[in-house]
Amino acid sequence: MNRRDFLKATAAAGIVAGLPAASHAAADPVYKTKLEKALIAQVADDATCERIAKAGFPGVELTRKGITVEQAIEGRRTAEKHGLRIHSLMSGGADFNNPDPDARKRSFDVMVERIQVTAAYGASTMLLVPCRVGGMTMPKPSQFSIDFDPQTLHVRTVVKDDNAPFAAYIDAQNRSTDLTREAVTKLIPVAAREGVIIALENVWNNLWVTPEFAAAFVKSFDSPWVKAYVDLGNHVRYTATENWLRAMGSLIVKLHIKDFRIDRSMKNDGEFVGLGRGSVNWKSVRDVIDEVRYNGWVTIEENNYSDAEYSAIMDRFFAGQGV
């Protein structure tokens, strides 16, 4: 079934994987920005590339670790054979705040190798999660109100009221900021040499959890080789996706898309759900993407629908019809 037939069939049924079919009663918005859709895969082998291209996706983001430069070159050739672009490597988490200097050095060396692999893939970005913290008392997502020094990026307070219960967390946050800035700054010459942008993503690592603070952190590197990889669903529990987009603005180099349903009674203040079933206002998000003038890749980072369904969902989202 080709894409046109698929859309006709889903419109007639009135549903795509449990989602209402898009209404065409009003004209679709006209956007100035152009978005490209991509899926995530482990490797770029023939079967994977054929499947993704056949579903109508021009791009892919790869995740497998331990790939050599030679294997990456072969993966790039395979992807290109299928008309597919490997646009990013999801490098995984670094360990830049480890108290052991040797462990930090090992993690740094791994990221150098992954930047080289990213370049061999022909990808423009390497997604990086610099470090994580946990195991101490932290505010609930709805409590956060971070005040930080704009020069040092050290956090002074994380909630509006009593911050004494969060002293250990504030210390861990500030230490992680210092060590990450040190490590990423040393990675910048490697990234520049290889032509790869280090893309720092907003993830559940309990660090830089508000948009203004995260944007200040990314901007502090003052380098075209360090940008923001914004996940549109990851931090909805802290504040609306639109706020993340506006705060990051021109710092954004790539976007992930997933959905999150807020429920403050749950352990994590909600849960990840399939696109269209959460708390994100996708029509508004598309408008703000245009407002901040982001052009580029939007990669699906969930696994709730088929490739064909995702292709149709992304087409609707790009056209401003929601998902």
Image (cartoon, grey):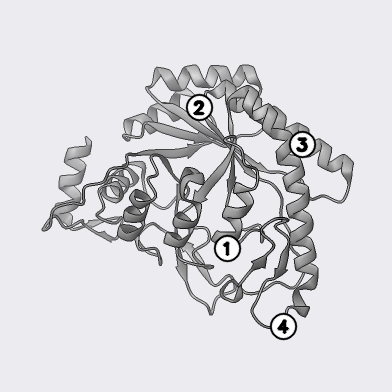
The quadrant of the image that shows the C terminus is bottom left
Of marks 2 and 4, the one in the foreground: 4
Q: Is residue 19 visible?
A: yes
Real-space CA distance between mark 2 and mark 1, rounded to the nearest whole angstrom: 35 Å
Q: Position of residue 4 (x, y in %)?
A: 18, 39
How many other residues sit within 10 Å of disc 4, few (<14), some (14-19) or many (≥20)? few
Of marks 1 and 3, the one in the foreground: 1
Q: Which residue is mark 4?
A: 162
Residue shown at 60% from the left, 76% from the top? 143
Q: Is residue 1 visible?
A: no
How many other residues sit within 10 Å of disc 3, few (<14), some (14-19) or many (≥20)? many
How many other residues sit within 10 Å of disc 2, few (<14), some (14-19) or many (≥20)? many
Residue shown at 64% from the left, 48% from the top? 220
**Circle 1 sits in a helix, a strand or a loop, which is it?**
loop
Real-space CA distance between mark 3 and mark 4, rounded to the nearest whole angstrom: 37 Å
* Residue 18, quarter of the rendered image: bottom left
Real-space CA distance between mark 2 and mark 4, rounded to the nearest whole angstrom: 51 Å
Real-space CA distance between mark 3 and mark 2, rounded to the nearest whole angstrom: 25 Å
- Dot placed on the residue nearer the N-terminal end, 2 or 4: 2
Q: Which residue is mark 1?
A: 210
Of marks 3 and 4, the one in the foreground: 4
Real-space CA distance between mark 1 and mark 4, rounded to the nearest whole angstrom: 19 Å
Q: Amino acid at mark 1?
A: Thr
**Circle 2 sits in a helix, a strand or a loop, which is it?**
loop
Reply above or below: 118 against 211. Answer: above
- Dot placed on the residue nearer the N-terminal end, 3 or 2: 2
Q: Which residue is mark 2?
A: 44
Q: Which residue is mark 3?
A: 108
Q: Is residue 300 left or right of residue 68?
A: left
Q: Which mark is residue 145?
A: none
